[in-house]
Image (spheres, helix red, strand yellow):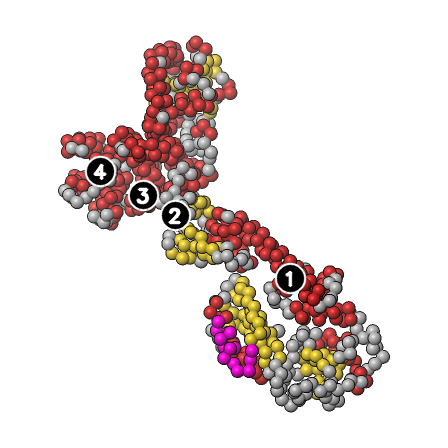
Amino acid sequence: MNNNTLQSIYKRLLYKHTSLFTFEERQYIKKYLTEYYLNNSQLVIPFGRSIYDKLCICETILNEIGLGKAAVLSILFQDLVDNKAINIAEIEKKFATNVSTIIQGMSRVSELYEKKTSLETENFRKLFLTFAEDIRVILIIIAEQLHIMRTLDAYESDNKQNVARESSFLYAPLAHRMGLYAIKTELEDLSLKHTNREIFKDIAEKLNETKRSRDKYIHEFITPLKLKLNELGFNFEIKGRTKSIHSIYNKIKKQQTAFENIYDLFAIRIIFDVPIDKEKAACWQAYSIVADMYQPNPKRLRDWLSIPKSNGYESLHTTVLGPQGKWVEVQIRTERMDEVAEKGLAAHWKYKGIKSESGMDEWLKNIRDILENPELNAVDFMDEFKLNLYDKEVFVFTPNGDLHKLPKGATVLDFAFSIHSGLGCKCVGAKINGKNMPIKHVLNNGDQVEILTSPTQKPNPAWLNVVTTSKAKNKIRQALKEVEFKDAEIGRETILRRFKNWKIDLDDGKISRLAKKKGYKTVSDFYQEIAQEKLDILHVREAYLELDKQDNPLNQVETRSAEGFTNDFTAKEPAGKDDVLVIGQDLKNVEFKLSKCCNPIYGDEVFGFVSVTGGIKIHRNDCPNAPQMIARFGYRIVKARWSGKSVGSQYPITLRIVGHDDIGIVTNITSLISKEKNILLRSISIDSNAGLFQGNLTILVNDNKELEVIVKKIQQIKGVKNVSRS
């Protein structure tokens, strides 16, 4: 680019917009841009980002969009700010203009393009709008794309197709939404020119060939109209507008017909120059004249005067039967309405069936209110306006660049379940922008998320408090039910197998009674506890065998007293150890069993209970079943006490431990027990929920003094909140 061309566009801008900058400000701009772009021999300027390109974009945003000083400064200085040649604070101080939101928004959008993703998705459009934040960023980006399309012949051939397609599926719709109808039309036509050159050339040639006949027809149509409209006494103009090549191409495709069969190649537009208070009256009077002169089609009347479109578009449309029996669309509006419709901020992006979104509708309604208020300057308003259309949504990328939309506040686990329920069930965390994060981490716009999984991971109820989306909650509940069902099946198979080995017939009715007796809501819950080894299968067997007898107590020995019963016992001397339990009237060597419901050990205060099978069961005085046994079967209670020393006997005790959910805490507990000489660890099971773990620890001890010592030591371990004896 030679200096003459550069000087030409620079002078043209200054001449047309003399009041935009002061003389000192112009000198400041010239100094910085000259030093950065022209006198920097080491600077490598990417194609399309030269100072000439920037001046062309400035010309577009000033002349065709209507932005002002802040937008021009942002375009000129963005690269300098990004490369730290100047800072935003200095620009704002020098020009007394807020440019930070625009420059930062443009930089964020530039970073967005660097991510590997598909620009064709609606999600990308939403993320694009969210990243832009300030509406002027979007308008500048559209102007940049328009400049690229106007100079696309200078680009490498490999990139032309991609750039042209982007204009069609992303930038033209955005221009439409922003109200830049003329720019939207030009982008579509230029896109078609480079993606389907033959069709573009064919339609352009046919339009050129038929131009004379169209002009003749338009003249024939509007000449009598002008005479009648002059009688109204208003200033007006009538012009024929030929449809764009892209629009004609869409009609050919939609109607599956040839160019020659497309009759509505143009529309007649009547534009009045009248005060605001006379706009509607002038438009309706014009409609009356048109309807009197040409037969209208009542089905094609569109009244956007009485109730403007939600995007602020105002006009009166009718379709009438003109000369030679051709249908002609007539648009009636004022200069204000025409300017707003063609290049104003009140975009009519729902025009011809484009799907609406409530957020954009509300924003456009605000824009329309501003444009209808003559006391407000729309450009000044945009200094305070933030584009928060999608503040209730968050958009994140997969490692492959696919874009996903989630509600604001969504977590890593929400994202995993949005991809696939199988991925969610195995999720243990994620890498977000290269950093490891837990499943509860809240996602932010533009995050790149890689889900981390483990084959041993299973859903748990605490996950329901981690996720925010209903989809994830439903998937977790479904997964939990599947886990519960599998555990119940495993538990039932375990009982069947063990009972078969013990030659015991399994009765489902008795199992249901047993589960209910032990406080389970359902038999499935009972089976799950067995599968998870929270219930001792030997305890289950004993309870199962005694179920019927306990329901009908003492039906065989109702006339016998507890004292008489104990006197009938034959003393049995346990081999190899001293008797440590004295039952009844100082009787020793009596056959007894330690009850499983309270697991008494040496040193506990205990009593004996005469069972229907002919033996005595030893219970702790504080056994949960003690009050009921004493109240109902007091005659079967016998005294019992420990005697001598506990030598050679160890008693199994289950401790219930609650603490913070930390894998290190389990290691500390097991390490502590392993160092105790007289205590053995029999089993341990851990379950975590909402940041806490609950564990059942079964150990073998000699007496209750050893138990008290080990309980105190466990309570002192960091993270342990409570230790209780089951």
**Residue 518 has which mark?**
none
Q: Earlier in the sequence, mark 4 or mark 3?
A: 4
Q: Secondary structure at mark 1?
A: helix
Closer to the chain start, of discs 2 and 1, is 2
Q: Residue at x 42, y 24 (%)?
A: 250
Which disc, if any, is residue 446? 2
Query: Callout 3, which amino acid?
Result: Ser
Residue 705: image x %, image y %? 58, 84
List the residue tagged with mark 4. Answer: 50
Region in magenta: 667-680
Which one is earlier in the sequence, the residue at label 3 or at label 1? 3
Q: Where residue 330 sits in the image (x, y, percent)?
A: 42, 19
In the foreground, 518 or 626: 518
Residue 264, picture quadrant: top left
Horizontal and vertical percent for residue 185? 36, 27
Point out the image quarter for the C terminus: bottom right
Which amino acid type is marked by label 1? Answer: Gly
SS at mark 3 in the image: helix
Reading the image, the residue beneath label 3 is 110
Closer to the eye: label 2 or 1 = 1
Q: CA distance from mark 4 to mark 1?
A: 74 Å
Name the residue tied to disc 1: 491
- Does label 2 or label 3 sit earlier along the sequence? 3
In the rendered image, the quadrant that contains the N terminus is top left
User: Magenta segment: does it hold 677?
Assistant: yes
* Res. 506 image quadrant: bottom right
Observer-nearest of 382 and 606:
606
Does residue 574 appear left or right of residue 417 in this picture?
Answer: right
What is the distance, in whole Å, between disc 2 and disc 1 at their CAs?
A: 46 Å
